[in-house]
Image: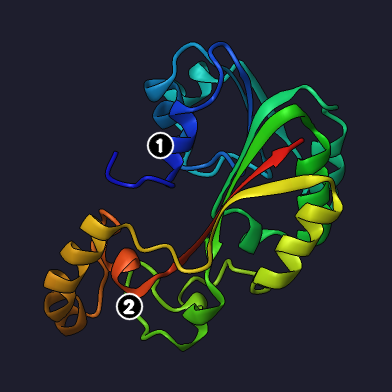
Amino acid sequence: MLRRYGKAAFVLNIPRGGTVLDVGCGNASACYIKGLRPDIHYVGVDIGDYHQTDDSKSLMDEYIVSSPQRFSETIARQGDRFDAVISNHNLEHCNDQEGTLRAMASVLKDGGRMYLAFPSEATRGFPSRMGTLNFYDDDTHQAMPRWAQVMSILRGAGLSVDVAARRYRPPLFFIAGALMEPWSSRRRRIDRWGASWAFWGFESVIWARRT
């Protein structure tokens, strides 16, 4: 596994036949997750059809669309039925980050796990590049998630933290990013495989568990 604590590794560790809530399920996320794990029961929730396809919609066992204002409430209403919750670069787009975190924690079963990835606080000082390297390159980003606050909310909601990478730098991708950095800097754009993100430590990654 090239990214030991990446999204794919998390998905592959979900119990067989598990029920999964994908929070912010745009960009045809269901195709990726069900491609890895066709056995899971997939529930997607979002505030609209963000780059969904006919294939991605057909792969969802449940698809929930909410307003931005009621997003955390919509999540919380699902009840504690999930073996896993995935929030992959969704938190930074939320109007109510604290409410969304608490809602995601509340729907986990005992022993259920959460995957969180969001931009590191350090990204405020990164250079601006096409594809997003500086937090403010993406004008759909809301407030910057605060690492200490996120950790405090998760623990306060009864979750223990198994993985806490404030600036996640998987080694092979870091090396690839270092080799590609002259090209990336010259073209003012990042690659599409995540090497630039790994080199700079763009992502904060957390795996948490309801004990």
Residue 74 location, quadrant: top right
Residue position for label 2: 129
Q: Is residue 107 left or right of residue 63?
A: right
Given residues 101 and 187, the one toward you in this image is 101
Residue 45 appears at what percent x and percent y?
Answer: 67, 35
Q: Is residue 62 above or below residue 74?
A: above
Q: Does the residue at mark 2 contact the one at mark 1 (Cβ under 8 Å)?
A: no
Residue position for label 1: 8
Q: Assess disc 1: are there few (<14), some (14-19) or many (≥20) residues with their C-alpha within 10 Å of its C-alpha.
A: some
At x 36%, y 86%, the residue is 127
Q: Give residue 106's mark.
A: none
Residue 203 appears at what percent x and percent y?
Answer: 46, 64
Q: In the rendered view, how is the structure colored? A: rainbow
Q: Is residue 140 above or below residue 23?
A: below
Evaluate whether residue 95 shows in this view.
Answer: no
Q: Is residue 110 left or right of residue 54?
A: right
Q: Earlier in the sequence, mark 2 or mark 1?
A: 1
Q: Is residue 62 left or right of residue 191?
A: right
Q: Assess disc 2: are there few (<14), some (14-19) or many (≥20) residues with their C-alpha within 10 Å of its C-alpha.
A: some
Looking at the rendered structure, the number of numbered marks drawn on it comes to 2
Q: Is residue 37 above or below residue 204?
A: above
Indicate which label's residue lies in the foreground, 2 or 1. 1
Residue 177 appears at what percent x and percent y?
Answer: 21, 67
Residue 130 appears at what percent x and percent y?
Answer: 32, 73
At x 53%, y 13%, the residue is 16
Evaluate whether residue 185 shows in this view.
Answer: yes
Given residues 111 and 39, the one toward you in this image is 111
Q: On the rendered image, what quadrant is the C terminus found in? A: top right
At x 39%, y 74%, the residue is 133
Say which element carries label 2. loop
Q: Amino acid at mark 1?
A: Ala
Q: Amino acid at mark 2?
A: Arg
